Image (spheres, rainbow, N blue to C red):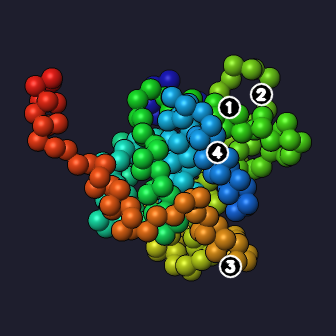
């Protein structure tokens, strides 16, 4: 229809989106998933190992840093500021096309050091498919054990077996981070900055969503099986990056 022309659809009222209370995952379900991914990474090899640890990294980014999965898929190790314990979230993956730099909480910093030699952070192809496949294995694992599927990884039922799986509770990972972070720190500005949202939106949506402070404390105390202190990590990190003159010359000539 020509722009501005009168038509019947103009008389229709635009339906409003009904507000819903965000669904949060329990800290126990987060712990179980992260540790299952770590155990799987130790048991498989090759690309499966790399993809499993990449998946573990993505979930840690969403759960403990408040970023979106799509933003996590775009992160590489070059985006980590090791000296200042900050992570750069590029605008390429951001929903609002805005680059931001997030400070790392202590437990995320511990996971980052743990995963430095394990996750390759492959941004090529479709990371979503790799993550979806691995999380699907976790759902099958729980089903075999007779355990319920937690809200954290629940998906919508579909009659089409080839349809793309959709999470049952949209953005549950970010909601879980925001609710726990706001309850723990009681600083809506700090939480909003990490999430890239407005302060008003954070206060209206997430205030007192986590009722008990102890739950938030437990959530941000989820740490990897091995926690390296900064000195140990720095030593191993330096050893990893040492390149001799001979190695450099050989690499140059072979190139």
Q: Indicate the secondary structure of the residue bearing disc 1.
A: loop
The answer to whether the residue labelled 1 contacts the one labelled 2, judged by CB atoms less than 8 Å apart, is yes
Q: CA distance from mark 4 to mark 3?
A: 29 Å
Residue sitting nearer the eye, 229 or 98: 229
**Outermost residue, right direction?**
146
Instruction: Name the quadrant containing residue 205.
Output: bottom right
- The dot on residue 100 is none
The answer to whether the residue labelled 3 contacts the one labelled 1, judged by CB atoms less than 8 Å apart, is no
The answer to whether the residue labelled 4 contacts the one labelled 3, judged by CB atoms less than 8 Å apart, is no
From this view, report whether residue 24 is shown above or below residue 216.
above
List the residue tagged with mark 2.
158
Going from N to C along the chain, the mark reached first, 3 or 1, is 1
User: Residue 80: in sight, yes or no?
Assistant: yes
Query: Residue 54 appears at what percent x and percent y?
Result: 50, 41
Residue sitting nearer the eye, 172 or 147: 147
Q: CA distance from mark 3 to mark 1?
A: 33 Å
Q: Indicate the secondary structure of the residue bearing disc 3.
A: helix
Q: Indicate the secondary structure of the residue bearing disc 2.
A: loop
List the residue tagged with mark 3.
213
The answer to whether the residue labelled 4 contacts the one labelled 2, judged by CB atoms less than 8 Å apart, is no
List the residue tagged with mark 4.
39
Q: Residues within 10 Å of mark 4 (few under 14, many from 20)?
A: few
From this view, report whether residue 113 is shown above or below residue 210.
above
List the residue tagged with mark 1.
165
Residue found at x 33% / y 55%: 237
């Amino acid at each position: 229809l020509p722009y501005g022309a009168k038509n019947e659809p103009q008389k229709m009222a635009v339906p409003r989106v009904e507000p819903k209370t965000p669904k949060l995952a329990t800290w126990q379900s987060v712990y179980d998933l992260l540790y299952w991914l770590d155990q799987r990474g130790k048991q498989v090899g090759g690309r499966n190992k790399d993809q499993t640890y990449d998946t573990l990294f993505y979930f840690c980014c969403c759960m403990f840093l408040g970023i979106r999965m799509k933003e996590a898929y775009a992160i590489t190790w070059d985006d980590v500021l090791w000296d200042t314990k900050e992570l750069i979230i590029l605008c390429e993956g951001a929903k609002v096309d805005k680059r931001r730099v997030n400070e790392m909480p202590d437990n995320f910093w511990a996971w980052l050091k743990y995963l430095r030699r394990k996750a390759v952070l492959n941004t090529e192809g479709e990371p979503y498919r790799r993550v979806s496949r691995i999380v699907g294995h976790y759902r099958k694992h729980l089903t075999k054990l007779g355990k319920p599927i937690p809200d954290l990884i629940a998906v919508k039922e579909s009659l089409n077996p080839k349809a793309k799986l959709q999470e049952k509770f949209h953005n549950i990972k970010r909601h879980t981070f925001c609710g726990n972070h706001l309850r723990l720190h009681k600083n809506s500005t700090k939480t909003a900055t990490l999430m890239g949202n407005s302060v008003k939106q954070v206060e209206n949506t997430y205030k007192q969503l986590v009722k008990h402070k102890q739950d938030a404390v437990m959530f941000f105390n989820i740490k990897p099986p091995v926690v390296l202190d900064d000195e140990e990590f720095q030593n191993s990190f330096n050893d990893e990056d040492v390149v001799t003159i001979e190695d450099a010359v050989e690499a140059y000539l072979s190139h």
